Amino acid sequence: MSPPVVSWLIAIAVSIPAPLALAEEKNPDPWEGLNRKVQKFNDAADRRLLKPIAKGYTKVVPRVLRRGVSNFFSNLTYPVVVVNQLLQGKLREGASDTGRFLFNSIVGIGGLFDPATRVGIARHEEDFGQTLGKWGIYSGPYVVVPFLGPRTIRDGAGSFADSYMFAPRYAEDETVRYGLTGLYFLDGRAALLDVEELISGDRYAFMRDAYLQRREYLVHDGDLEDAFLEDDWED
C-alpha cells in the first residue's frame, strides 16, 4: 500500500515496457478540466509544504536510518498484499509473501531490515484496487483528489478498503498513531524526490498516463499482451 498523499508520484516510479491502451474507457479522463485545477492545487501544496519537509528529512536523517524506516513500513503493509493475493486466488504467492512478512518481522527485527530479499524471497505488490480489476470491475473515470492525488474510482474505493489494514490506525496512543502515520507519508514522499526528474512535457498528462498505465500493468500482472488483446479495436 502506497502513501495516498504521494500516489501521483509513485505512478512514474515503475518503468512500463510500452504504452498500454486502456480498453475500458474510450475517454478515461472525462473530468480533465477539474482534475487539472485540483492537481495545480496539490502541486502548490506539495511545493510549499511537503517537499521542503521531505528534503529536510533526507538531509538530517542518515541514509541507513531512512532505509530502516522504509523497510519497516514496507513490511508493515504486507498484510494488505497477502489478503488481496488470497482474494485473487493467488495461493502460492500469498504463502510466499506470508513467509516474507514473518521472516522480515522476526529475523529483520520488526521489518527494520530486509533479509528476505537477500535469501531470494520475492516481493509482490497487490491491493484491493487490483483485486477489483481482477474481478472484472471497470476502473471508472480518472480523478485527482485534493491532497490525495490521482486515482480512478475503482482504485479510490480499493485504497479506502486497504486503509483498514494499516496497523498504525489501531494504535491506542494518539501520539504513536499520528506519529507513525506522519512518518509513513514523509518516508514515501522523501523516497520520491529523485523520481520527479522523469516528468517531462505536459506535467498533468504525463502523470495521468503514467498512473493509468501502471495500474493496468499491475492489474494484468505485467502481461501487456493480454491487455492489448482485450481491447476493442473497432472504430
Image: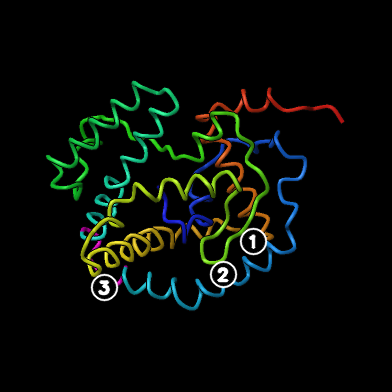
Q: Position of residue 121 (x, y in %)?
A: 26, 30
The type of residue carrying mark 1 is Arg
Which residue position is annotated with label 1? 203
- Nearer to us: label 2 or label 1: 2
Q: Amino acid at mark 2?
A: Asp
Label 2 vs 3, first from the N-terminus: 2
Tell me if mark 1 has few (under 14), some (14-19) or many (20+) residues whose alpha carbon lies within 10 angstroms of its own.
few
Q: Report crowding for label 3: few under 14, some 14 to 19, many 20 or more residues within 10 A (C-alpha).
A: few
Q: Quadrant of residue 213?
A: top right
Give the spatial CA distance, label 2 vs label 1: 10 Å
Magenta stretch: dominant SS?
A: helix
Label 2: which secondary element: helix
The residue under label 3 is 60
Residue that appears at 23% across and 70% down? 175
- Can you tell which of label 2 and label 3 is closer to the viewer? 2
Q: Which residue is located at x 27 percent, y 55 percent? A: 170
Based on the picture, tell me whether residue 143 belongs to the magenta stretch. Answer: no
Extreme residue in the bottom direction: 48
Name the mark on residue 43. 2
Is residue 164 or residue 57 the one in the foreground? Answer: 164
* Tags 2 and 1 touching, CB below 8 Å: yes
Vertical position of residue 36 compared to residue 210: above or below: below
Which of the image's four quarters has the C terminus?
top right
First-in-chain label (3 vs 1): 3
| Callout 1: SS | helix
Q: Nearer the viewer, residue 1 or 168?
A: 168
Dividing the picture into quadrants, the one containing residue 154 is: top right
- Magenta part of the protein: which range? 58-64
Colour logic: rainbow
